[in-house]
Image: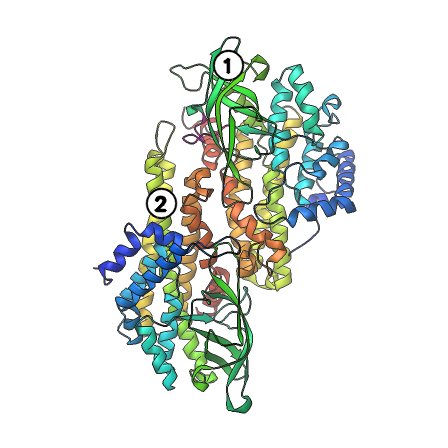
Amino acid sequence: MSTDTASTPRGTAADGDHWFTPEQHAFRRQVREFFAEDRVRKAVDALAEHAPREESGLLDVYRWLGERGWLAAAWPREYGGLGLSPVEAGIVLEEMILHGVPEDQHVLSIDTVGQFLLEVGTPEQRDRHLPPLARGEQIATVLFSEPHCGSDLAALRTAAVPDGDGWRLSGRKIYNQKSQFAEWALCAARTTDGPVKYHGITLFLVPLRSPGIVISPVWSMGDERFNEIVIEDVRLTRDHIVGGIDQGWDLLNDMLLLERTGMDFQAKLRRWLDSTIADARRTGRIREPAYAQRLVDLDARLEAGRALAWRMVRARAEGRADPVASAAAKWFVTQQSDELVRFGSEVTGLDGLLSGWDAEALDLGRPESVYRQSPAHTLASGTSEVMLHIIAASGLELFS
Amino acid sequence: MSATPDEITDLFTGELSATVRRMGDGPVAGGAPPEELVQAREAVWEMLGDLGLLHRVTDGTETPQELVEIAELMGRSLYRSLYQDTAAAAELIAAHGTAPAHRGLLDAIADGSAAVALAPRSAGTDDPAVPGALRLSDASGVLRVSGSRRFVPAAHEAELLLVVGTVPDGIALALVPADEPGVTLRRQYEISRGDFHAVELTEVPVLGGRLLTTPAQAVTAWRRTVARTRVRQAASLTGLAQGALDLAVERVKQRAQFDQPLARHQTVAFTLAALSARITAVRVLVEETAHTLVQRPDDELAACQSLFLAAELARDCAAQSLHLHGAHGMTEDADIQLFFRRAAVEALLWGTPAQLRASAADLL
């Protein structure tokens, strides 16, 4: 490698991001001190030493963050947070990723499922589910995609059929992650048939350890497996509904649009770029114009992406989130991913494509792993095409 | 009109092409590939020998059109073998090998009974045009070679290694039997799950007791070989791009989203159309370069330009075609991920685009 230490985006290194308050700068320093602790570094190093496809479930680092209330820093104290703003939550997420802590569980458990429950869950659902998520003691995931529908989620076929005072849920979900470790999943299912496919979808919080649920791996070229989940006749009650019957489509749109800040993606790309810059220094390629100019260009684009992502976070904190700008942030940041991994491999040459199984792999095979996982960025959390559609339809009003 | 035998075209584009694609996808780590894939690989190699493809290389009758077409077909089906390395070695041996052992080897290459792996890289960052250092010794009248090599393709299947290295008075072109006691092989595990090897050479006797040519003369010989190999590689990458595009076209016709096939969405259709147009342009450039090198074998500029354009095209096609497959494209069941992973390696093998651009800039 590359570098064992965390990446330091220019703003964070110099406390130079003008939009942070002095308290927020101080908070970042505290978070950095935590990640510099010996036990935390050892735990993160141990994760990096995992063989490809050796996936982790619950993480000690998450638990330690949870003990401080930092894992879900923006949640109220009663649910395990600190009642801070999305800015502090963003600082924790950014630092986590810059220090090499896997963020998938955070995005799924805290930013998606937990946030849904916080916004539209019942008091009972919040009391029961949010504290263990905030403590890092449980994982929650989402069951949205199906074999025949990804972006076109309204075409889903998983159905909850009325059964007395409840429902029986059946269907097939795919490309889900972490469900082998998760206790609960937020599942989108059809509850009412009608002429408009966007109507009649309900969100359920499904207990994954129920009889009738079979989770099977779908191996992918990434290190983390996908799962296929077959749900057969699982009994659910009103207590499992999140946000109201047939309200699922609106909720998904409102919540997911606002949740997309690009923060997780930009931090991940920044870590990769900093690693590439370190490799360019090590190999001397930083002094060759063919490499240096592209590194500078990528650095500029990631700085723009970071500024955009932070602007989205601040907008959320101020209650003026903008779905079009959020889509632009997600699109812009993830568009850099492909070029970044490709150019990174030019800097490292073939050595950077050796996998973690090879004794001579750079940085335990991380550059190779990053390369394999890169296509996921323009697919996950809404494809690039979906982001462009939002910008074209709602931003530019091209289709009206 | 195609200059390639129908059997070859059928093999790499017909029903067997899906099997050929999987033949080059080895185990993630350790273990051996499935026996049926090993046998299929041997059968394809035999077929190439029976059809006289390498014979046309050794006797110098392979036309530029054949060179490009065959490399493109192989790239399109992700065929992984020592064909390109053996062809490059055969051209060098035919031009410079004067020892009886060299002439005998040429006959064995022609009938498909000997394969050669090229070994110019001492590290993954090396530009093969500037081979890594090599040590020659001449103790007790036997010429021997020592050094380390990386990313040697299919070294475990090669009868010989053509070890290329920088020595004080030029470049050494040393053929060594791969089963000599001083040769040790270790498989390298990389993103394409191929069969690259790290090779350690310790005082290994050189075939025929001499280098293929003097180190001073080998400088030009190797430069020309690199240029021709870059054209073969560019053609292969153009084929890889076409293969990825073919899969994407098939997928978007079948997969419906938002009540119509993905192919009917203009953004999808135009993306694929643009890639197709780029493939057409790069293919023509590569063909022209192959012809040019016959007249002007030192035209390295055209070879560099062909290769970096083809390398970037292949990675673009593979990445965008995978994207259009959605999450399914990342699964092990989807062949498009084979193209994505393979393109990563093949695009760098004969020089990274940045290296090629720098070389081309010096030649402009």
Residue denoted by label 1: A167
Q: Position of residue B178 (x, y in %)?
A: 46, 73
Q: Which mark is residue B166?
A: none
Q: Are marks 1 and 2 on the same chain?
A: no
Task: State whether the magenta stretch is mostly helix, strand or loop.
Answer: loop
Q: Amino acid at mark 2?
A: Leu
Q: Position of residue A136 (x, y in %)?
A: 69, 32
Label 2 Cα crowd, 10 Å radius (few <14 / some 14-19 / many 20+): some
**What colour scheme governs how the chains and residues are painted in the rendered image of this protein?**
rainbow
**Which residue, as the protein is rendered here, is positioned at the far top?**
A164
The chain letter under disc 1 is: A
**Does residue A6 show up magenta in the picture?**
no
Q: Amino acid at mark 1?
A: Trp
In magenta, the rendered stretch is A144-153
Helix, strand or loop for disc 1 = strand
Q: Position of residue A20 (x, y in %)?
A: 72, 35
Q: Residue at image x 45%, y 44%? A: B332
Q: Is residue B203 left or right of residue B2?
A: right
Position above or below: B166 against A28 = below
